[in-house]
Image (spheres, rainbow, N blue to C red):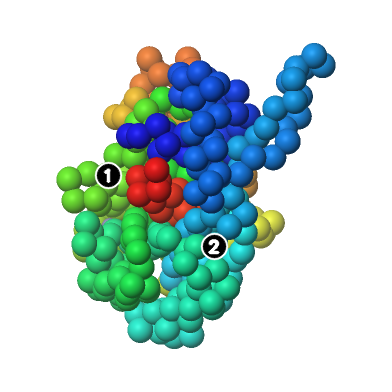
Amino acid sequence: MTRTTELLRVAHAHPGVTRADAARHLGIGTGATTELVARLTQASLLAEVPAARSGTRGRPTTALVAHPSGPLVLAVAISHRAWRIDVVELGGHTVASADAPHTGRSWPDVVAGVTAGIAQLRSRYGDRLRALGVSAPGPVTAEFRLDATTSGWHDVDLHDLWPDAPLLTAGNDASLAATAESARGAAAGASVALHLLIEYGLGGAVVDQGRLVIGAHGASGEFGHMPFGDPAVLCPCGARGCWGTAVDGTALARHLGQPPQPDPVAYAKGVIASPAPAERAAVAMAAAALGRGIAGLVNGLDADLVTLGSIAADLLAAAPAELESAYHSGLMAIRRDSPPPLVPAALGPDGPIAGAAEAAWFHLLDHLG
Ligand SMILES: [Zn+2]
């Protein structure tokens, strides 16, 4: 990595870092840093703004921020129902955003909406848009092909979203949310962080010392398909007893004796918000099933922090006693003295798109220095 790339990475990871602190991060002198900053400012990659003085006697210093006409990335989050596009500058700040529901259920409908959104942003930002990061609701191959079984999108090509994209990166929503939580959210500083997200099923990821564990085929993190659930229940993946079927909207509907719901996410949110006793009991069962499974994963992975996103966070908020009690009783005795905390993801629904932006910036920075 060149010094300029290193400096850009520091400015990205610590937006508004002072020039003096950047020099410390890089382990180089202030003179050399001044020279680097001058070069990057000249190239419209960085800008300097006055920073607050450090201490009363500190000399005025400058903070390193994104250049007002510098490069930008497009982060796209595709869910089963809708798309959203964020324009993100160096440092992770979103400068513009667009979103809309899909106009139909087929992949071409999704592509039509997203490409129109991208075209509009390109007419506004032009060549400043240098990379595309995509968050998708299913496993993504190294060739950027997506399988999202619940939506019926099989082996679709994510290149369709912006065929001429100068740089493309993509991943599944749960992995990207985990990346973002570790970079800028509730798991910053954790050694081994487990992130779990429930929407249409349960997904997640492990971030080990800041690195996402992706697996041999990039499809790690399918924790929802571990057999922690009821062996009598058939999962859409073809297996029986999947954990995901014990904690999501389909589980709540089953506990309440209701038919499968067309939108299990909206349905789950409705059930979790309801004060009715039958609903409370269903929520308690799902929360306990979530806690038991988390204990299994923590026992196996030796994670020191667990972040919960979307409906998993809602279950923690709605039935903390049931969830924590199932979690603690499933932990090995050696882990029970200081159980790894279960915390809601700090980035919430913004996690996947923030992770897509991080992934795009991660690759783009290699090309800028
Ligand atoms: Zn399954």
Amino acid type for the residue under numbered disc 1: Ile
The quarter of the image holding the N terminus is top left
State the residue at coordinates (58%, 24%).
21
Foreground of the two, 22 or 221: 22
- Would residue 115 be seen by someone viewing this image from the given angle? yes
Q: Earlier in the sequence, mark 1 or mark 2?
A: 2
Quadrant position of residue 108: bottom left
Note whether 368 is above or below 5 in the view shown. Answer: below
Q: Secondary structure at mark 2?
A: strand
Q: Residue furthest right?
A: 56
Which residue is disc 2 drawn over? 86
Q: How many discs mark residues in the rendered view?
A: 2
Disc 1 and disc 2 in contact, CB within 8 angstroms:
no
Q: Can you give x and y, in whole percent of width and height, for residue 182 in the image?
A: 47, 37
Foreground of the two, 286 or 362: 362
Q: Can you give x and y, in whole percent of width and height, for residue 255 in the image?
A: 47, 59
Q: Secondary structure at mark 1?
A: loop
Amino acid type for the residue under numbered disc 2: Asp
Foreground of the two, 352 or 64: 64
Which residue is disc 1 drawn over? 214
- Between circles 1 and 2, the one closer to the viewer is 2
**For the residue carrying disc 1, how many other residues have a C-alpha within 10 Å: few (<14), some (14-19), or many (20+)?**
some
State the residue at coordinates (36%, 68%).
165
Question: In the picture provided, is 139 more to the left or to the right than 201?
Answer: left
> What label does residue 130 carry, if any?
none
- Would residue 176 be seen by someone viewing this image from the given angle? no
